Amino acid sequence: MEYAFDSIHLTAHPTARSQATASRAIGAGSTVLAAPALATTLIPSEKGRRCDYCHLVPTEGEKLFKCTGCAAFWYCGTACQTKQWNVHHRKVCKRYNRYTASIEYQAMPPGHRTDALMLSQLLLEVFPKDEFGIEAATHRSDAVAHFFDLLKGPASRGNPTQISLCRPSNSAAVPPSIIEEVFARFGNNNFIVHSHLNSYAHGVFPLASRLFNHSCVPNCASKYVITSTEMMGMEIVALRDIEFGDELTIPYLDPALPFDIRQNTLQESYGFTCNCSLCNFQRASAPIPPLPTSPERLSALEAGLCAFVAVHVLQLDPSAPPPVSMGADAFSSLPSELHPLLGEGYLPTLSEEFSRASHEGPYDRAVAAGRVLLALYAVLYPQNYPQTGMHALELTKTAWNAIIAGERSEAPLNSSATRRLEDAARHYLSIASRVLEVYGPEGDMNGPLEELGVMRSLLEA
Ligand SMILES: C[S@@+](CC[C@H](N)C(=O)[O-])C[C@H]1O[C@@H](n2cnc3c(N)ncnc32)[C@H](O)[C@@H]1O
């Protein structure tokens, strides 16, 4: 197939068939691709909360309407209902409830049920159209063609006959070869859809899948765009300035996951060994030395990490404003005595401690844990990675809560302690703003960008 884009070239890749390269310089925050989903499925907890077609969450005073046939699909209005009906729902509306109540469906773990629903939907999309007289599906034939042009996943992923599918009544017409062809491309081309980084659906986006290879140090990331009455869409956004000829990559998984988990998942689900700079660094630095058992030694390492990030990643200088972006590949210059902090157990423990203390207090402990966690994110995540920005925003709110708690306490904070917390909150806010403004708005209304505005006005007051 021929592919032509504004800022992307599809060029040969030695092991991954092809790669997307920048056909011109691309600025941080630019959208390099925007495309609607071919198929999406809401996770069970989101059913009835957002429109099954466009994914909009109704605002106060608005409500969703149930499909009167199955009472299991909800829409924000007739436009979405009609589009979904024409594309695939009318093929299964009558059978849907029997399918979801079946022993085979109920026996699947929840994650597999979402996959089974989306695989069923994909099959309905790619059946010969005239079999069902589906006119509305023809404008999606490009997406279907892109889907069949995708690489197949590893053969070890199982057999489609073991999955219980929701089939239309004349399913005898579906040749097993089509089911196999769709199944073979399904597992390695299935995105987790999020709003403000909270996962709420799974989706298939054939064009993005066709173009972008994985890196744990990606220069792009996916985000999801909800537009009333339109099929929910994906955008690929540049996280940093990209030069002509650079490969455009996205993360297929969370880059801060432990090395072994990343490698195993990429091998099992996608059939390749990742050789990005983070993986190569972690391979070369294995085994990671254990964390010190003494709390004083651990605190010294944490202070060392924060100082390293302040100088080498944020390039903070008391006389200069903060730089415009977080550092790239900061891990490669991390002094070896700080490597124990990269061990797999440390980040989750710190993250739990921050989460617990930022909800229940004490807030000063939350700020201390959150500050080290931010430094670790700045080292492990690529430049302007949205998770880093979201954490910096949480940390700003936590520092603000510490100020308010200090004011209301029976033993109030003295003025210099309050000023230190205010300075810290402004510093985290500036990091959050820089990172999240590059990523831009995602998903539902009233997200982190609005929260940044609120925090800015509180801290400026
Ligand atoms: C979603 S496709 C990406 C587009 C693919 N390059 C193509 O030509 O269609 C995913 C597949 O690309 C290959 N791939 C993606 N990232 C890779 C990487 N970093 N190294 C090697 N192969 C990769 C793997 O075969 C993987 O299953």
Image (cartoon, helix red, strand yellow):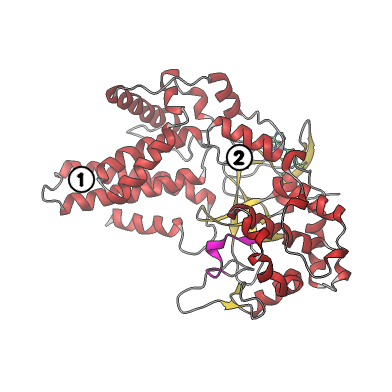
Residue 455: quarter of image: bottom left
Give the mark nearest the N terminus, 2 or 1.
Answer: 2
The residue lying at 81 percent from left, 59 percent from top is 142
Residue at the image position 27 percent from the left and 24 percent from the top: 296
Q: Residue furthest front?
A: 103
The vertical placement of 289 against 121, above or below, is: above
In this rendering, position of residue 286 left or right of residue 162:
left
Q: Amino acid at mark 2?
A: Asn
Q: Nearer the viewer, residue 178 or 461?
A: 178
In the displayed structure image, the side of residue 131 where residue 76 appears, left or right? left
- Which residue: 33% across, 28% down? 303
Image: 343 above or below 50: above
Distance of label 2 from label 1 (alpha carbons)? 38 Å
Q: Which mark is residue 219?
A: 2
Percent x, y for residue 31?
Answer: 63, 52
Give the crowd class for mark 2: few <14, some 14-19, many >=20 residues within 10 Å. Answer: many
Q: Is mark 1 within 8 Å of ligand 1?
A: no
Residue 6 magenta-highlighted: no
Q: Percent position (x, y) of residue 134?
A: 82, 72
Question: Which residues are drawn in magenta?
Answer: 41-50
So how many labels did they put on this image?
2
Q: Which residue is disc 1 drawn over?
A: 418
Position of 439 relative to 60 (above/below): above
The quarter of the image holding the C terminus is bottom left
The correct choice, above or below, for 109 with respect to 229 in the image is above
Which secondary structure lies at badge 1? helix
